[in-house]
Amino acid sequence: MLLKVFKNTVLFSIIIGISSLTFSCGNQMKSKAENSQLVEEENSSALHIISENQYVDSLSLTTAIEEKKSIIVGANRTESYLTLLKGKRVGVVANQTSVIFKKAYYNEFNRYHFTEDKSTYPNKPYSHLIDSLLNRNVDITKVFAPEHGFRGTADAGELVKDGKDTKTGLAIYSLHGKHKKPTKTQLEDVDIVVFDIQDVGVRFYTYISTLHYVMEACAEQNIPLLILDRPNPNGNYVDGPVLEKKHSSFLGMHPIPLVHGMTIGEYAKMINGEAWLNNGITCNITIIKVQNYNHNSTYNLAIRPSPNLPNDQSIVLYPSLGLFEGTNINAGRGTEFQFQRYGAPFLDKNHYNFSYTPVANFGSKYPKHENEICYGVDLSKVSAERHFTLKYIMDAYNHATDKSKVFNMSNFTTHAGTAILQKQIEAGLSEAEIKASWKTDLETFKNKRKHYLIYD
């Protein structure tokens, strides 16, 4: 769209294809005011009819935001779901990513990605969902927090304790501690549960396991679940070995590939449709759809989804470098470049010209090879493509001075979802040969996945 505004004149033109429309300056000012109001009000439009296990869409918006094709997350579409919460006692599953973006965020073309330094802007361009709902007089009775906690500061795998939010006074119940599933007692004073967490589309990223248990608890107590959907930054492809049932764990509960290519909302539909909940029960879900998003969209996160995914580079590389979590090789934890490098003291220092020393820091109290020099590869400045590759883990294995130190046996199998992958790497198969062994399982999954997609 070409927009040309003349000072002290009364018209502007919008050229789209062969169409041309002319408006007065007064209409232009009115349009701008209306657009701002739409953004301030979280860009909701019309509320469609909602029924069990359906998602909410809205009428097409003729605003500057839509013309720029800004992605509008489900949480921002408050007019589509506030009526569902009115007069209800609400439980919320949330963490630091559960935010509603303000007008400034969209007006600046979503340029606030991973900007956590308060000096960069006077006020954050978003408000937390909890604060926003409380300001709208929604009766929130409690909050449930996933791995890493409500504020997203706990280490990976660290048990999170129950507590109280210092700002709101709300009780917070951990879903990554003694209980990974809300208890019947915890849900006694809840009429509806809201789930709003940013995922990154990788099987062993545990937020989808939390989703499973929340759905199961809601189904058992006949409580509806409202999902505020968010884009999947790795949602443009499906790849990796499909999890074998015997290797199910909290790092992977379902027979899906390592990279599943679905949003939280789509994944919830699959959980129901494939009868993966206990005894085949289904959860009454309503999904608030993301606007202007499809599976080929590039989506940059504004807030790190967990302590060790600090930027877009780490999120793109995470599907591939995440496999190092099941090995004795450091993947950048204990540095400021988590999932943007890998190394170990037992990798060949004569082969690699890069080294670093992990130290305890935010997000990693006890990193692998703490205070030891690790030799390996820096990927922080490479042009990372959005796809899954085995070349990094194969490179590390092939250049280990002691190959017996690489794999952490059962832990690697848990991350890979199969014991075969380790054997294939150790046997010296090429990446192409290994990926060919997944082809049939991937095609089967993709055919199932089609039935649950909300976005193109």
Image (cartoon, helix red, strand yellow):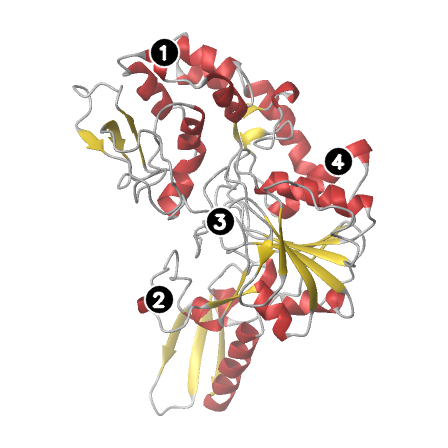
Cα gap from disc 1 to disc 4, whole angstroms: 39 Å
Q: Residue at x 38, y 41 (%)?
A: 364
Q: Nearer the viewer, residue 226 or 50?
A: 226
Asked if marks 2 and 4 touch (Cβ < 8 Å), the reply is no
Classify 441 as above or below 404: below
Helix, strand or loop for disc 2: helix
Q: Residue at x 40, y 10 (%)?
A: 426
User: Residue flagged by tag 3: what amino acid is it?
Assistant: Ser
Query: To which quarter of the image does residue 384 belong?
Result: top left
Residue 76 seen in this snapshot: no
User: Residue flagged by tag 4: what amino acid is it?
Assistant: Leu
Residue 430 position in % (x across, y down): 39, 14
- Please give the residue where the numbered disc 4 appears in the rendered image: 277
Residue 15 position in % (x across, y down): 44, 70
Asked if marks 1 and 3 touch (Cβ < 8 Å), the reply is no
Residue 337 seen in this snapshot: yes
- In terms of sequence position, does the residue under pointer 1 or pointer 4 come before the other? 4
